[in-house]
């Protein structure tokens, strides 16, 4: 069964339930409720509300943990001690990326398997620094801000050509603000 079919079935069941409740309300609209029924209904509603709140709280805590326990943004006030450090400068409308220790002007090459620290800043306005894996998935992103450096850590696992695109609209040349770099197989890996 396709995922969409399952969602469709759930949606239909939900709509059916709402319709049943509606029919029930219409059928009982003429009758006056006695005090005992009213109290019982109020208690039921209060119970349902508490249950719903607990459920939402559980979902919130669970989803937060599941999505954030491997939060990629490290503490910004410490030395990260990554073996590979890349300085990233965004400007209207290009990216300048240089690896510390690599000759200026040579194209950027990184190794998979060990952490890379990206130090991201901007020469003019805010840009969004985003790295896309060879299969098109976004692997990491942060803001490129003027007069501020955002540090971000990432360990590449897949060798290949990675693309960098701007995720923050920054003027006419925003869309073609693209560059790429190579990630090589980990030495000995
Ligand atoms: Cu942009």
Image (spheres, rainbow, N blue to C red):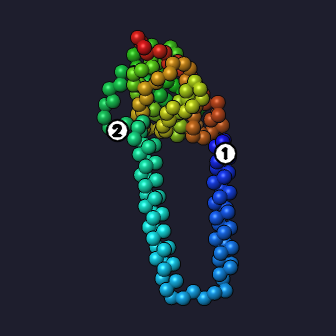
For the view shown, which residue lies furthest in the top direction? 188
User: In this image, 14 relative to 154: left or right?
Assistant: right
Q: Residue 105 or 69: which is nearer the viewer?
A: 69
Query: Does residue 25 show up?
Result: yes
Q: Which numbered tag is attached to residue 75? A: 2
**In terms of image quadrants, where is residue 18?**
bottom right
Seen in the picture, residue 10 relative to 89 is either above or below; the reply is below
Q: Quadrant of residue 172?
A: top right
Q: Position of residue 154 (x, y in %)?
A: 43, 29
User: Dot 2: what SS?
Assistant: loop
Q: Quadrant of ligand 1?
A: top right
Instruction: Note whether ligand 1 is within 8 Å of mark 2.
Output: no
First in residue order: circle 2 vs circle 1? 1
User: Left or right: 12 with respect to 64?
Assistant: right
Label 2 environment density (alpha carbons within 10 Å; few <14, some 14–19, many ≥20): few
Coordinates of residue 110 in the picture (x, y in percent): 46, 18
Give 173 or 142, whichever is nearer the viewer: 142
Residue bearing mark 1 = 4
The residue under the point 46% across, 24% down is 156
Quadrant in the picture for the C terminus? top left
Q: Residue at x 65, y 58 (%)?
A: 13
Image point (63%, 54%), residue name:
10
Left or right, 5 with reference to 72: right
The location of residue 69, given as percent across then percent down, is: 39, 41
Q: Helix, strand or loop at disc 1?
A: helix
Q: Position of residue 86 (x, y in %)?
A: 43, 24
Does residue 2 lie above or below 101 as drawn? below
Determine the image quadrant of residue 170: top right
Position of 116 compared to 158: left or right? Answer: left
- Which numbered disc, 2 or 1, marks the residue closer to the eye? 1
Which quadrant: the N terminus?
A: top right
Any part of residue 163 in sight: no
């Amino acid at each position: 069964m396709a995922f969409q079919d399952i969602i469709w079935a759930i949606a239909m069941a939900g709509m059916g339930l709402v319709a049943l409740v509606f029919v029930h309300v219409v059928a009982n609209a003429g009758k006056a409720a006695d005090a005992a029924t009213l109290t019982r209904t109020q208690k039921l509603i209060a119970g349902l509300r508490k249950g719903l709140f607990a459920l939402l709280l559980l979902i919130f805590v669970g989803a937060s943990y599941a999505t954030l326990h491997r939060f990629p943004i490290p503490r910004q006030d410490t030395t990260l001690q990554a073996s590979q450090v890349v300085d990233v400068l965004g400007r209207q409308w290009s990216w300048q990326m240089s690896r510390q220790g690599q000759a200026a002007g040579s194209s950027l090459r990184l190794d998979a398997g060990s952490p890379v620290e990206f130090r991201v800043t901007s020469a003019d306005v805010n840009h969004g620094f985003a790295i896309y894996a060879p299969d098109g998935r976004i692997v990491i992103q942060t803001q490129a801000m003027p007069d501020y450096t955002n540090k971000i850590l990432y360990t590449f696992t897949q060798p290949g050509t990675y693309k960098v695109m701007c995720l923050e609209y920054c003027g006419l040349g925003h869309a073609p603000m693209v560059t790429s770099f190579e990630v090589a197989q980990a030495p000995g890996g």
